[in-house]
Image (tube, helix red, strand yellow):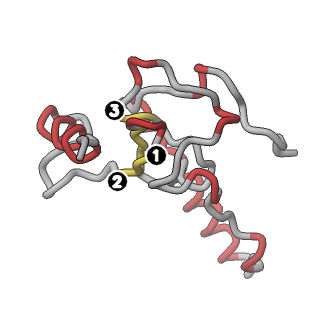
């Protein structure tokens, strides 16, 4: 049975690392095997039973209060996904000023910049930087 409330505390905010990316790839392989098994047995899943993204964890919205404040050293750094819908997809989040959620693809940018490259990290920080008007 799935928990009703999300976990709270600073332990839910984990840096996005190469190990995180390997875990996502492992989840994708397991899901693909499950899809193949269902396809072989002609099992269909109703559309309403398919997982959906959490509306309170959408990109561009502030982080819900239930998660608490992330530690200051984790602001503007790539973090593992909080939304269960995206945990098996190659994405990561960055929490910026005002606890705004930004979601990025973990595939190599321009086919050569990994999500861990210094150039891409700096580009993400520039992208999400809020400047006063």
SS type, badge 3: loop
Q: Earlier in the sequence, mark 3 or mark 2?
A: 3
Residue 89, disc: none
Quadrant in which the N terminus appears: top right
Where residue 100 sits in the image (x, y, percent)? 45, 44
How would you rate the neighbour count of disc 1 (Cα within 10 Å): few for under 14, some for 14-19, many for 20 or more?
many
- As measured in the structure, the alpha-carbon distance from the residue carrying label 1 to the one carrying label 2 is 14 Å
| Residue drawn at point x = 19 percent, y = 53 percent | 109
Q: Depth check: 105 or 42 in front? A: 105
Could you tell me if residue 43 is visible in this image?
no
Q: Earlier in the sequence, mark 1 or mark 3?
A: 3
Estimate the spatial distance between the alpha carbons at disc 1 and disc 3, rounded to whole Å. 10 Å
Element at label 2:
strand
Residue 76 got which mark?
3
Which residue matches tag 2?
105
Closest to the observer, 61 or 50: 61
The percent position of residue 123, horizontal first and vertical second, equals 17, 43
Left or right relative to 110: residue 95: right
Disc 3 from disc 2: Cα separation: 15 Å
Q: Residue at x 80, y 39 (%)?
A: 5
Query: Which is closer to the viewer, label 3 or label 2?
Result: 3
Q: Which residue is drawn at 15% across and 32% down?
A: 118
Q: Which mark is residue 101?
A: 1
Residue 103 in the image: above or below residue 13: below
- In the image, residue 15 sits, relative to residue 133, either above or below, namely above
At horizontal 72% and vertical 31% (from top left) the residue drawn is 7
Specify few, some or many for label 3: CA neighbours under 10 Å numbering under 14, 14-19, or 20 or more.
many
Horizontal side, residue 124 vs residue 87: left or right: left
């Amino acid at each position: 049975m799935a928990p009703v409330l999300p976990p709270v505390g600073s332990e839910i905010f984990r840096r996005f690392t190469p190990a995180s990316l390997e875990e996502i790839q492992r989840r994708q392989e397991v899901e693909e095997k499950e899809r193949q098994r269902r396809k072989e047995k002609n099992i269909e899943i109703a559309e309403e039973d398919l997982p959906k993204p959490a509306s309170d964890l959408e990109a561009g919205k502030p982080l819900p209060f239930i998660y608490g404040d992330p530690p200051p050293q984790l602001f503007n750094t790539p973090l593992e996904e909080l939304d269960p819908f995206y945990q098996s997809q190659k994405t990561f989040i960055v929490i910026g000023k005002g606890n705004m959620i930004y979601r990025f693809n973990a595939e190599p940018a321009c086919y050569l910049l990994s999500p861990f490259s210094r150039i891409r990290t700096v580009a993400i920080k520039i992208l999400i930087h809020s400047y006063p008007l």
